[in-house]
Amino acid sequence: MRRRDLVARVGLYVVLGAGLLVVVGPFLWAVLSSVKPEAEIRRIPATWWPEVFTLDNYRELLSRLDFPQAFANSAIVAVLTTLGNLAFCSLLGYALAKLRFPGKRALFLVVLGTLMVPSMVTFVPQFVMVSNLGLVNSYGGLILPFLATPFGVFLMRQYLLSVPDELIEAARVDGAGELRIFARVVLPLCGPALATLTILTFLASWNNFLWPLVVATTEDRYTLPVALALYSVGQNRIDYGLVLAGAVAVLLPVVIVFVLLQRHFLRGIATTGLK
Amino acid sequence: MAATTATAPAKATSGTAGPRRPYRIRQRLAGWLFATPFTLLFLLFMAVPVVASLVMSVTDLRSTDLRTPFAVEFVGVDNYTRLLDDAQFRRAALNTAIFVVVGVPLTMAVGLAAASALNSALVRFRTLFRVGFYLPVVTSIVALAVVWRFLLDPEAGLVNNALRLVGVDGPNWLGDADLALPSIIVMAVWRNFGFLMVIFLAGLQAIPADLYESSTLDGAGRWAQFRHITVPLLRPTLLFGGVVTSIGYLQLFEEPLVMTRGGPLDSTLSVSYHIYNQFGFGNYGYAAAVSYVLFAVIVGLSILQFRLLGSRD
């Protein structure tokens, strides 16, 4: 029996280890290739470890393309989107979980009904609206449609349902106003949910592609994925060193944050069943 | 909504009827106030545009008409019938169907295998594997598509370099009309199985261990246990994972855009890519019509899921 377990264990580790290599390998290879000169990247047979280590690709990324601007745009859009969601989703999430007011059921149904509506279905009408508002190629156009997402509202409501009513009732009996109760009693209890919401919203914004692709029409408004995609699509003989450096610049911050905070990510999926 | 006032004072039996009333009014005002930002943004960027676009999909609205929206012609269901005559749309629909029908079961199989392996009592370092397998899920699809384009490059790519080591001359994966879509399917499995692994792992851990113990006593082997205990009990989770993945795969877009630009010969053109192209050509009414067809398929899938789940539980 024990011997069979040992064989099974070794087998499992071999399969899982091979899987890990296949999944993580491309990331490592992208990083390693991004610090090789273009000639070495294209050499046959390929080198695994760089023979010549160079940061030229990154230097070029900073100078020739509008990547610093794209990086800044991505950061601005992601930070403002996240702040908006933290504020507005927790407000409505609290109202839906703990307050009684006419229209509450209808609002919750709206949130549930739009939770899964993909942006591919709505981007054309949304673009027409943003265009009529004169927000094409502006930060407002990039940010406003994502400032309060149904997903965030749902996440906050589900979390707040578990907060005991007694705490809120006690504050009410003490004569605190609803805004004050929200700010002083409710929000401090929401730490874990707000952390999850921050991570997931920031990430979704950072990786978002279709909407900025449509709304940003000049290079000074491109976000990182848009700049990267349009640059690599626009070339027939692709400059791999440069686009790989760009890809690493998009991937690496996320990979680091994910590895550090993986508990929050995986909890977010477990509680909502959504990405 | 009238019910809310009737059910409200359930806890108000302690004789504090006096201060209750202002509470209720204040709660109502607070509720509305707290709902205002979301509601305004929702109306402006979701409800109004979507309703308008339903109208748009039965007109011949083009990008040049945006400033004079009332000058557009009512064209009825022309945009929808035009779909059927559009050979590119039919090709895109076929490609997307193949991508979903082949890609979803593959992704589920790999996800379930990974979850089962990680659920085994024999495996340690679970976090390492979970984080590793989940890594592609959280990272930018555009950046990954760039990396995979490099990976599949006929000369410099990792895949063909590996094949060369064993003496095989690898094909031009993304440049061959027969291989481009299968390559993109493999990439999608690689990227998405980690998500299903996490979902399935949660489902597996909810299965009571004594079911396995008692069946072992009855002489059931591992495979019999998997077929007769794991799969039936995991059915709702599998169904959920399958539907969520299908909905995601139906929107295939970034990979062909970055890796193949829909080619060669439209072999990787997807419905979403077609919507984007039509939008790019300025055919807003037509693009909206195609996106509603896509949406109808997605809603149909979701309803099917609820039906299937509801009938068993």
Image: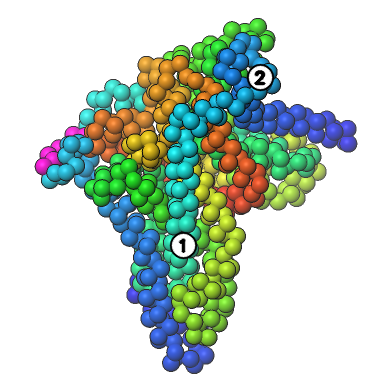
Front tag of 2 and 1: 2
In the image, residue B199 sits, relative to residue A246, either above or below, namely below
Left or right of B288 on screen, residue A267: right
Q: Nearer the viewer, residue B22 or A200?
A: A200
Q: Is residue A270 visible?
A: no
Three-letter code for the amino acid on which mark 1 is drawn? Ala
Q: Which residues are magenta?
A: B71-79
Residue A52: image tag: 2
Rendering coords of residue A117 (x, y %): 39, 47
Magenta stretch encompasses residue B198: no
Give the residue at x 35% y 50%: A140
Crowd tier of the residue under label 2, counting other residues whose Cα lies within 10 Å: few below 14, some 14–19, many 20 or above: few
Q: Which quadrant of the figure has residue B238?
A: top right
Rendering coords of residue B249 (x, y %): 46, 34
Residues marked 2 and 1 touching at CB (< 8 Å): no
Q: Which quadrant of the figure has residue B152?
A: top right
Rendering coords of residue B228 (x, y %): 66, 40
Q: Chain of mark 2?
A: A
- The answer to whether dots 2 and 1 both sit on one chain is yes
Q: Nearer the viewer, residue B275 or A199?
A: A199
